[in-house]
């Protein structure tokens, strides 16, 4: 059993930038220790430098089945415990169904879905010891279908169901599993696939009329990792400015 008097430890994947990095900062401010995992060596190095040597940087690719056990071992060797796993690493590669060849499909699935499965499986033993938490980062695209997201949207819908599987099976060990579905956030991932037209259309379609920030998503992730959410498991929480709730969300119907 993990010692209740020590600081808790979170391993955050895809933590070199964007939502993962913002979440790491919020959790450190809340008293957590963090392990930052990413496959982008340069970005990971500069992200780790923001934590004055107190964060552990783990250069791994979550889609590599060999990597997950090694990353968890490195985290346990360094910190001696693991209390939260944030499966945030993701890639967006949008395209029409007819142009999504199998290689493109696999490129999305291997990170967005396989990575969540592999990392969680490798972390389960350590999370049993701490009665810890899993937070999977899905997407509004996993809740609502749209054009060009045959691989991305399907990967995120699968992550939503995987979260429920994890909650159902790991609950008896005291492990909680929840998912956060961000709406659009101006990160490198989103800006690579959002044109100005898309940005304007999102503003119109979202009740709060704006993109979210990395910190706004991170706050929900940090809450779900924390003791404040100790009776919350198997839940899918959209942090999306109301986008998912709007049903027939035509801007013309709002006037
Ligand atoms: N930004 C958005 O609008 C948005 C909306 C909905 C969901 N999301 C989800 O939020 C998560 C974070 O996205 P972001 O916008 O901060 O993106 P980002 O591109 O800014 O950051 C993602 C990080 O993940 C890392 N990464 C990617 N594949 C990896 C792999 N196989 N192994 C290890 N690291 C890997 C990247 O190197 C990068 O540092 C993703 O799962 C994404 O799908 C983002």
Image (tube, helix red, strand yellow):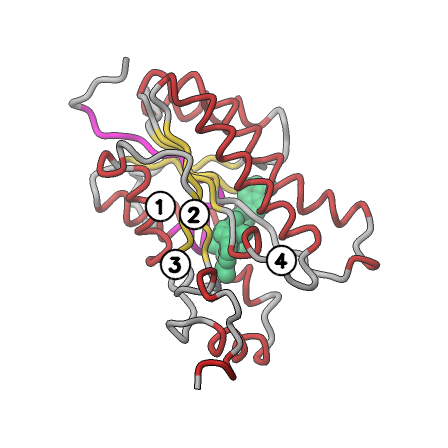
SS for tag 1?
helix
Q: Classify 21 as above or below 136.
A: below
| Quadrant where the C terminus is found in the figure | bottom left
Within-10-Å neighbours for mark 1: few <14, some 14–19, many 20+: many
Q: Nearer the viewer, mark 4 or mark 3?
A: 4
Q: Position of residue 106 (x, y in %)?
A: 73, 42
Give the residue number, with chain letter if any, for mark 2.
180
Residue occupied by mark 4: 145
CB of mark 3 near ligand 1 (< 8 Å): yes
Q: Tell me whether circle 1 and circle 2 mark residues in contact (CB < 8 Å).
A: yes
Q: Which residues are magenta?
A: 6-21
Q: Single out the mark in the foreground, 1 or 4.
A: 4
| Mark 3, secondary structure of its residue | helix
Q: Which residue is denoted by mark 1 in the rendering?
A: 221
Q: Nearer the viewer, residue 144 or 187?
A: 144
Residue 139's x, y, as percent?
Answer: 51, 53
Q: How many marks?
A: 4
In depth, the one of 187 and 163 nearer the eye is 163
Residue bearing mark 3: 214
Crowding near pointer 2: few (<14 within 10 Å), some, many (20+)? many
Residue 91 in magenta stretch:
no
Q: Quick check: marks 4 and 3 in contact, CB under 8 Å?
A: no
- Closer to viewer: mark 1 or mark 2: 2
- Tell which circle, 4 or 3, labels the residue nearer the N-terminal end: 4
Q: CA distance from mark 1 to mark 4?
A: 23 Å
**Residue 99 placement: quadrant:** bottom right
């Amino acid at each position: 059993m993990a010692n209740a008097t020590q600081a808790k430890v979170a391993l955050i994947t895809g933590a070199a930038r964007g939502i993962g990095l913002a979440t790491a900062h919020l959790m450190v401010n809340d008293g957590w220790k963090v392990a930052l995992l990413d496959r982008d060596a340069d970005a990971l190095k500069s992200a780790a430098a923001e934590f004055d040597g107190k964060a552990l940087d783990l250069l791994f690719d979550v889609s590599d089945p060999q990597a997950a056990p090694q990353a968890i071992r490195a985290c346990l060797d360094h910190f001696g415990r693991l209390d939260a796993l944030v499966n945030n690493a993701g890639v967006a590669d949008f395209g029409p169904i007819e142009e999504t060849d199998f290689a493109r499909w696999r490129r999305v699935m291997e990170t967005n879905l396989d990575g969540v499965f592999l990392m969680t499986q490798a972390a389960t033993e350590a999370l049993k010891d701490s009665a810890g938490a899993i937070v999977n980062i899905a997407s509004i695209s996993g809740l609502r279908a749209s054009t060009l997201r045959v691989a991305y949207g399907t990967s995120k819908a699968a992550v939503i169901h995987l979260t429920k599987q994890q909650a159902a099976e790991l609950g008896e060990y005291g492990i909680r599993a929840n998912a956060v579905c961000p709406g659009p956030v101006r990160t490198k991932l989103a800006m690579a696939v959002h044109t100005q037209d898309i940005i304007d259309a999102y503003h119109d379609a979202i009740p709060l009329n704006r993109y979210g920030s990395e910190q706004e998503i991170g706050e929900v992730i940090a809450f779900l990792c924390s003791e404040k959410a100790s009776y919350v498991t198997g839940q899918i929480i959209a942090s999306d400015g109301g986008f998912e709730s709007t049903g027939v969300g035509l801007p013309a119907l709002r006037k």
